[in-house]
Every structure is written in structure tokens, then in C-alpha cells.
């Protein structure tokens, strides 16, 4: 089925394989390409001597590092339609970029940037299809989130958001990719997450030869299978009749309640999956029925019977999809805790971790014969900051050392120069001469209410070390700290735990974690001064699902939401309390 797609990726894959032995040369070519793209723009005019830059050292000396905040003015000019702001090329679309602790930023996408994505995605896809032939034998599912009703264009008329992952590939490949997807891209037009999941499950269950499931966050897959269990009998009836009836009350264009009575947010942000890479928003008043009318639902009584059997037998994925051969998902950093629950219903199915792919650019890609995802050495120009020596000159790709951790700087043909991506990577080894890097977490995930400077990496380490001990040997499937500001009280952190452990154990967990955090000077000092209140534990139910719902309400796409042990946004106590949280 995918032989043609594999052949189309072969030339780029070959060039990437050759580049792995000469990363310094490949990176020099990337830098030259980026410099050509930025020349004769507003951005280059601000940089003295830009036209004389030739080498990486000259580039580092002349161009300041940038951050999301430092490029805001340029992004606003681009959104208004101004030409040649960051690059000579026009902006094709803006992509919302959702981090783990806040609402979306907007990243300008140009043809040059799309070409750089393809330089990484093509060798990854070629390696997948050539190393795992079984994946070529059936359709694939790539996670789809609803686009909702957010405005589809900027004031300057530039589209916002793509609807499918295939939009990052060349246009001539997009129809071929769409034909091998198990779920039609029109699912992304549905106005809320739960109806999107229900319709997605209709097509997945109907697909008897599904070969690949690809999601970003592993909890996305867990929530999808939970929805299959929750609505399984209704879905079986629909398959039998050849209809699709997402339960009313799951939430529509203006929010609502799902089958369990839980509120869902109002309009949702842009998502993934579909045929048109940058559609206009749904016409006002168009809802679920209108979207469903554009899809075909034929009776599948044999699949309905199999679904009922699977539901009675514990809902193992292999019963529904015997040819399923691979699960693709994040497996590093905080996502590692969600892999086990996601794979619970897919015993015996191989898991491949994804590389580090951000909306701004792709840092690494997985190859089956490499010790860790391989640096996307043909895509962008990379620099690496040493967190222990932030004043030192950033290292280049060929200068990295095995076992060291670095923060990534990215320069792309989308116009971002020396951009602080905020991601930490550790060098696990080398594939030929090119570094293999594993995502370790966010370098900028620090919460600082009153000077306590609490880092997500520290919180993750403490929770991993203490929660299993205090809570009977198991780490809860959902564990997250977040700050709270309460009237007439010092700000403090709350620890949200999904666990059946007795209340006394939750209180013990809060005390133990508080003691560990107080080993840090700034946190302890803030507590001693009374500027920071004590940590308290709060029990939650369906933590991942409710976490996702609020992240969407804060402006993130469902497919972009990352698990985190430290969320910097306040208001989680009220959110979980409205939806069934209990404090011990």
C-alpha cells in the first residue's frame, strides 16, 4: 500500500544518511541556506554586517539570541500582512505552538521551513517503512484533534493552523498520505474533543487491517481507548446500522457536558489531521450533523460483533486490530510516565519513541538502528547551550559530548534566528558522526511566585523518588504540582494526585515532598520567610482527561498537550474541584 510513498522518500533519506558522516559540512550548508533566506529583510537590516556573515562563528558573534517574546513585534507585523519581515519568502500560514504551561504562540511557516521539515520527516518515514515492512500492509492513524471555530486567518489574511500532519510534506505527496490514513481528515472539523474522539473511534474500529497508531502524547491514546470503553456499546450499534451518532451532550460548538456530566470548554483551537492543509473555520451555526453529512458510514455488522466481544474481554487492541504492528508516541521526559497506561491495552505491540519535533522546527528523528533520536542535521542550523556554563559560546553539532545535557538554539528558513527553543537534550551517543539526543524536558519550566525558583526538572525528580514509596509502591497515573494564589493567604503549591491511597498517605506525601523541596535554598528561604505557604495534596479523578480539558480551555490543541509535573498556571484547584476533586 505504501510502496509508492516509500519510493518518494528515498532520495531525501539517502542524502540524510550521507550527511550523518559529515555533520559539520551538513550544518554549514544549513546555515548558508538560512542566511540566504533572511538576507534583504527587516530582520537582516537590524544586524550590523549581516551580509558579511559566512561562518558559524561570525553568525554567533553578529546575531543575538532570540526568544518568543523578542520576536513578538515581528510576528504582529507578519500577521498584518507586512512583507519581508523575517524572511524574503512570504508566510504560507501560522501554526499555533502550545507548550506545557501556557496558551499558544504563533510560528510563521514558509515554503523554506516546510522543506526543512521534509528533510527530517522523509528519512524518518523511509526508515519506518523499510525497517518495519508490516507497517506497509495497512492503513495508519495519525492523531487528529478538532479545529473548532477559532478564526482561520490573521488580519492580513494569512491562514492559521494546518489540519493534518501531511501538510508538512510536499504538496504532491499529501493526496497519497491522505489515502493511507484510516480516519478521514474531515474529523478535524468537528467542534469538540469528545465528538471528534467518537467519530475517530468509528473509523478505527471499522478498519480491520490497521497497521500503525501514531499519537504525540501517550495519554492521548489512553483517553481514546477510555472513550471506546465508555461509549463502546453505542458505537457497536452505530457500526451495525451504518450510522454515526456521537452522544448529544458530549459538547458542541458552544461547550456542553459529556456522558458523565463533565463540562467541556467552549471553542477549541486548531488541530491535526485532514485534507485541506489550512481550511477556513466552520461557517457560523454549522455543527456536528453538518460535518458528519460529508462522511460515509456503511454498515459493519461483523466489526460491531467483534467490538462487543472485545468489550466483554477487557478491550485489548490486538482483538480489534490483529495486524497492528507499531505504536508511535513520545516516550521521553514527563511523557515516560504515560507510556505504560497507554500500552496497557496493546500488549505485544512494538513502541517507537518519537524524536523532538516542535512547531518551530524539528530537532531529532527516530531511526531504528540508532541509540536515540538522531539530530536532524540537514534541516536547520543548531547550537547548544551548556546549562552549567551559560556564559560560554554555544557549541555546534559536531562539538557535542556524549553524556552531556544542552539547551537547543534553532535557526530556520522560517526566519527564527538563534531561537531559544527551551528544550533540554542529552547526548546518548552518535550515529556515524552525528549526535543522538534524547529530550530531557523544558529548560525554561521554572515557577517563581516569590523567588522560590522551582524548576520542573527538580519537581519531576522528587515526585519520581518519593511518590512510589509513600503511596504503596506505585506512582499515580496523574501527579502534578501547580501554584495557587488564595485571598488573604500566602501563595502556595498544590499537589494533585490520582490515587486510591488513604487520605493519611496523601498528607504524608505532601510532607515528604515539601521536605525534599526545602533542600533547595530558594524554596526553603521563601517558606521560612512565610512568603510561600505549605504544599497541600488534593485527590483528583480522571486526572489526565480533566488536565487535557483545561489545557484546551487555555488555548492549546489536544494533540499538542504535553504531560508535566509542574504547571505554572494557577487555578487548578478550582478546576479540579468543579469536576470532582477531593482534598484529604
Image (cartoon, rainbow, N blue to C red):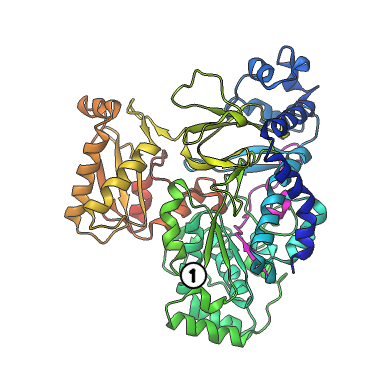
Q: Is residue 4 above or below residue 381?
A: below
Q: Is residue 153 magenta?
A: yes
Please give the residue where the numbered disc 1 appears in the rendered image: 348
Q: Main secondary structure of the magenta part?
A: loop
Residue 123 relative to residue 507: left or right? right
| Residue in front for this viewpoint, 487 or 572 | 572
Q: Is residue 267 left or right of residue 31?
A: left
Q: What's the residue at 59%, 83% (across, down)? A: 303
Q: Is residue 331 left or right of residue 196?
A: left
Residue stretch in magenta: 139-168
Is residue 489 something that shows in the picture?
no
Element under label 1? loop
Viewer-nearest residue: 472 or 196: 472
Residue plotted at (78% across, 17% down): 51
- Magenta stretch encompasses residue 395: no
Give the farthest residue toward the right: 172
Quadrant housing the N terminus? bottom right
Q: Residue at x 64, y 40 (%)?
A: 361
For residue 311, above or below residue 338: below
The picture places residue 135, in percent across and down from the top left corner, at: 65, 66
Amino acid at each position: 500500500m505504501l510502496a509508492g510513498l516509500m519510493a518518494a522518500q528515498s532520495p531525501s533519506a539517502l542524502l540524510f544518511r550521507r550527511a550523518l558522516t559529515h555533520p559539520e559540512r551538513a550544518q554549514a550548508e544549513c546555515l548558508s541556506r538560512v542566511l540566504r533566506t533572511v538576507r534583504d529583510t527587516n530582520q537582516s537590516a537590524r544586524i550590523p554586517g549581516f551580509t558579511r556573515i559566512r561562518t558559524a562563528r561570525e553568525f554567533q558573534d553578529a546575531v543575538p539570541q532570540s526568544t518568543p517574546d523578542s520576536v513578538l513585534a515581528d510576528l504582529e507585523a507578519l500577521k498584518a500582512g507586512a512583507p519581508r519581515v523575517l524572511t524574503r519568502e512570504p508566510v504560507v500560514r501560522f501554526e499555533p505552538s502550545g507548550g506545557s504551561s501556557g496558551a499558544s504562540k504563533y510560528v510563521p511557516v514558509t515554503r523554506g521551513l516546510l522543506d526543512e521539515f521534509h528533510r527530517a520527516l522523509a528519512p524518518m518515514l523511509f526508515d519506518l517503512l523499510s525497517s518495519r515492512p508490516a507497517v506497509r500492509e495497512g492503513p495508519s492513524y495519525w492523531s487528529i484533534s478538532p479545529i473548532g471555530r477559532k478564526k482561520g486567518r490573521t488580519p492580513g489574511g494569512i491562514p492559521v493552523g494546518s489540519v493534518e500532519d501531511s501538510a508538512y510534506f510536499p504538496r504532491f505527496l499529501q493526496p497519497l498520505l491522505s489515502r493511507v490514513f484510516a480516519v478521514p481528515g474531515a474529523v478535524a472539523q468537528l467542534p469538540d474533543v469528545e465528538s471528534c474522539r467518537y467519530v475517530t473511534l468509528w473509523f478505527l474500529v471499522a478498519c480491520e487491517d490497521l497497521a500503525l497508531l501514531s499519537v504525540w502524547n501517550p495519554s492521548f491514546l489512553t483517553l481514546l481507548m477510555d472513550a471506546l470503553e465508555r461509549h463502546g456499546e453505542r458505537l457497536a450499534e452505530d457500526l451495525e446500522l451504518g450510522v454515526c451518532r456521537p452522544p448529544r451532550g458530549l459538547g458542541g460548538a458552544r461547550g456542553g457536558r459529556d456522558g458523565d456530566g463533565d463540562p467541556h470548554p467552549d471553542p477549541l483551537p486548531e488541530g491535526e489531521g485532514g485534507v485541506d492543509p489550512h481550511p477556513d473555520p466552520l461557517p457560523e451555526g454549522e455543527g456536528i450533523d453538518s460535518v458528519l453529512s460529508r462522511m460515509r458510514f456503511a454498515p459493519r455488522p461483523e466489526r460491531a460483533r467483534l467490538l462487543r466481544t472485545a468489550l466483554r474481554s477487557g478491550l485489548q487492541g490486538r482483538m480489534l486490530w490483529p495486524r497492528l504492528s507499531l505504536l508511535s508516541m513520545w516516550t521521553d521526559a514527563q511523557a515516560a510516565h504515560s507510556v505504560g497506561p497507554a500500552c496497557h491495552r496493546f500488549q505485544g505491540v512494538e513502541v517507537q519513541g518519537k524524536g523532538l519535533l516542535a512547531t518551530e522546527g524539528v530537532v531529532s528523528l527516530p531511526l531504528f538502528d540508532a541509540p536515540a533520536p538522531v539530530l536532524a542535521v540537514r534541516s536547520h542550523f543548531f547550537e547548544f547551550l551548556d546549562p552549567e556554563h551559560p556564559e560560554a559560546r554555544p557549541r555546534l553539532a559536531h562539538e557535542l559530548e556524549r553524556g552531556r545535557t544542552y539547551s537547543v538554539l534553532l535557526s530556520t528558513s522560517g526566519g527564527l534566528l538563534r531561537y531559544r527553543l527551551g528544550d533540554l537534550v542529552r547526548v546518548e551517543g552518535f550515529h556515524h558522526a552525528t549526535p543522538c539526543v534524547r529530550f530531557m524536558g523544558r529548560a525554561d519550566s521554572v515557577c517563581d511566585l516569590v523567588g522560590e525558583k522551582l524548576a520542573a526538572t527538580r519537581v519531576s525528580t522528587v515526585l519520581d523518588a518519593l511518590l512510589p514509596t509513600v503511596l504503596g509502591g506505585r506512582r499515580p497515573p496523574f501527579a502534578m504540582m501547580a501554584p495557587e494564589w488564595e485571598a488573604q493567604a500566602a501563595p502556595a503549591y498544590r499537589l494533585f494526585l490520582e490515587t486510591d491511597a488513604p487520605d493519611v498517605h496523601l498528607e504524608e506525601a505532601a510532607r515528604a515532598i515539601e521536605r525534599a523541596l526545602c533542600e533547595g535554598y530558594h524554596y526553603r528561604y521563601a517558606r521560612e520567610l512565610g512568603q510561600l505557604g505549605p504544599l497541600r495534596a488534593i485527590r483528583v479523578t480522571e486526572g489526565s482527561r480533566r488536565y487535557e480539558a483545561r489545557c484546551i480551555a487555555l488555548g492549546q490543541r489536544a494533540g499538542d498537550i504535553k504531560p508535566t509535573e509542574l504547571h505554572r498556571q494557577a487555578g487548578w484547584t478550582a478546576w479540579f474541584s468543579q469536576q470532582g476533586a477531593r482534598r484529604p
